[in-house]
Image (cartoon, rainbow, N blue to C red):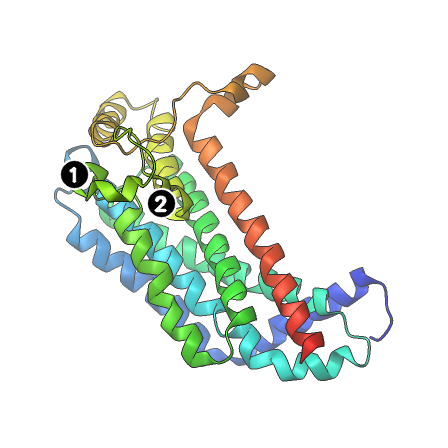
Amino acid sequence: MFNNPITTQINYQLKRQFKIKSYEKLNLTVSFFIAPLLSFLSTYIFRADDDLVQNSSYPNYLFFMLISAIFFGLISSVFEVIKDKNMVQRESLGGVSIFGYYLSKYYVLSFFGLIQTLLYNLVGMIFLHIPWALVAFNSLVMFFVIVVSISFGLFVSSFARNSMIASNLIPVLIIPQILLGGLIPYQDMDKSIYMWEENFNKAPPIAKIMPVKYAYEAIITGNVVFTTGNKEVNDQIAQMVDYLQDNQFMSMQTETFLSNFGLEYLSNTWVINLLIIFAFIILTFILGYTLFYRRIFNA
């Protein structure tokens, strides 16, 4: 275990973290119960019509699915580093890899987040009659949001001094996502949110640091792309996108400089937005690990 190559350390830590999680049977049961329960509640509330084509509340369902993903990721991760800090400090003296611990924690939480994603979307598929192609795509975007929220949660857990501070930061991370994620039209808000910009026909600067904003934009535009085989559903969802564009929701044009690389799929808005979310994941992971490393060795 000690003074082993980093890959061996990571493998050891992965097995260890999975074993620790498997012992938390009550927490796992609650986590796996909450996901389908919240999905059922959101489908019940936003099922304006049994037919997806006639369900004008479908964009609302997608938005609150992403907010649920933020909630799942933060709750599962925001206390993890805090509770293990003393243990990691002791083990680091014996040569146990801190990076291996942090990375394994990230992977294990993401794995259980994937299970929550699948449970959530399966319930949505059953009650809203969502086609398989959209279920798969919606699950992909939701999983990206869960991973980025896990990354944010570990970041918060790395600098928060105790669980009380960490728990108080949860609403600070979730509520701005709800307000500025794109469901509420920006034109209905005070113009001061645009700060130095005067162009009110696009997303304000403060909204551009919200991962949910990019995820919602990705999931809406992706739903159009992945329903091209069903003209009736495609036309309905396309109208939803047009409505959102009229309310300054979209932040970029479909055609971008990325298409000049000869990869046509890079011109899709949903691809660009998922790449932005991936950048959020990488950045917060690096910042979180850096803070965690400094806390361990400066303590």
Dot 2 and dot 1 residues touching (CB under 8 Å): no
Amino acid carrying mark 1 in the image: Asn
Q: Looking at the picture, how far across and down is residue 186, in whole percent?
A: 23, 39
Q: Is residue 95 above or below residue 176?
A: below
Amino acid carrying mark 2 in the image: Ile
Quadrant position of residue 111: bottom right
Residue 102 visible in the current orientation:
yes
Q: Is residue 94 above or below residue 144?
A: below
Please give the label number shown on residue 213.
none
Q: Is residue 128 above or below residue 96?
A: above
Read off the residue under disc 1. 55
Q: Position of 89 compared to 8: left or right?
A: left
The quadrant the N terminus occupies is: bottom right
**Which dot, 2 or 1, sits closer to the camera?**
2
Q: Looking at the picture, how far across and down is residue 222, in whole percent?
A: 38, 32
Read off the residue under disc 2. 206
Quadrant position of residue 269: top left
Q: What distance separates the C-alpha of mark 2 from that of mark 1?
A: 31 Å
The residue under the point 48% across, 32% down is 272
Kindly state the secondary structure of the residue where label 2 is placed. helix
Q: Looking at the picture, how far across and down is residue 200, in whole percent?
A: 25, 31
The residue under the point 33% across, 57% down is 68
Residue 122 visible in the current orientation:
no
Label located before the other in sequence (2 or 1): 1
Kindly state the secondary structure of the residue where label 1 is placed. loop
Q: Looking at the picture, how far across and down is residue 42, in whole percent?
A: 23, 55
The quadrant the C terminus occupies is: bottom right
- As rendered, which of 106 and 16 lies closer to the eye? 106
